[in-house]
Image: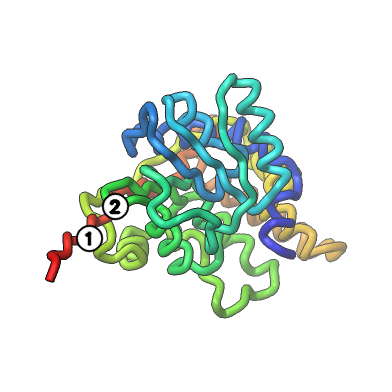
Amino acid sequence: MTARAVWALGDYPTVAAEVIPALGPVLVEACGVGPGQRVLDVAAGTGNVAIPAALAGADVTASDLTPELLAAGSAQAERRGVKVRWQEADAEALPFDDGEFDAVLSCVGAMFAPHHQRTADELVRVCRPGGVVGMINWTPEGFIGQLFAAMKPYVPPAPPSAQPPPLWGDPGHVGALFGDRLTDVTARRAVLRVDRFGTAEEFRDYFRANYGPTIAVYRAVGADGERRAALDADLADLARRHDVGGGAMEWEYLLHTGRRVTPPATSRP
């Protein structure tokens, strides 16, 4: 199943609105987005970054592989009374000019593109020298990283060239991807408190119904009742282990920001 098809499964707009809405404003504030800036939200989904950036006065373009998410984001932006351009695009081959944007952001989005170096190269390419590149990514050790680890045994192996999404939450990995092309880099771990679910089973059932990657795993398991029961148990156990009280959880992420290095001026011969 293609990535585009996976993210069209279930109801990701509801997940974005009910579970992780606080993340977009965190990234917008960390990157200093303000009036008049040209901002690109990469793998924008329904605009958890794009809409707060537009509310801050920026000139915003939101790009994503999945038309269904762009349509939902457009409707949401209209309800919020802000203007955002919505464009279908692959994070690994962005259809924008070099240096077109003052800020290039992605919130738990571009991390799911399979080829990490290609994605990092594109984020830097479309950012102007001196502009900011900012990302929020789930960490390997955090809840969502562990969710993908729990689901991995139930799906066929990924192609050898595809890298695991939670690697984007490893500061060393991200630093190596961007190399010396970013300066003034900050990389800090933080947690999102999620209190949407009263029990571990409620989390499991919600993600089984709404979150595209989890739905895809259940489809891969198919009618195998034993494996389906094992998957049910593994996901509930994961949520139970992360329960900090009353069903609430703390999901760890990496906030990574930096400014694109300005090339040195060349003297005339």
Looking at this view, name the residue that lies furthest to the bottom.
160
Please give the name of the residue rendered at 33% of the width and 37% of the height, measured from the top-left corner: 30
Label 1 amino acid? Pro
Q: Give the residue number, with chain letter if any, for mark 1.
A: 263
Asked if one can make out residue 145 in the rendered structure from this viewpoint, the answer is no
Q: Residue at x 47, y 47 (%)?
A: 106
Q: Nearer the viewer, residue 218 or 125?
A: 125
Task: Tell me where residue 7 appears, x and y as whole percent.
Answer: 68, 51
Label 2 to label 1: alpha-carbon separation? 7 Å
Q: Is residue 6 left or right of residue 85?
A: right
Please report contact status of discs 2 and 1: CB closer than 8 Å, yes or no: yes
Quarter that holds the N terminus = bottom right
Colour scheme employed for the rendering of this structure: rainbow
Classify 148 as above or below 8.
Answer: below
- For the residue pair 59 and 241, the one nearer the viewer reads as 59
Between discs 2 and 1, the one toward the N terminus = 2
The residue lying toward the viewer, choosing from 131 and 107, is 131
- Residue 246 horizontal/vertical position (percent): 54, 30
Q: Give the SS element for disc 1.
A: loop
Amino acid of disc 2: Pro
Which numbered disc covers residue 129? 2
In the displayed structure, 179 sits above or below 45; it is below
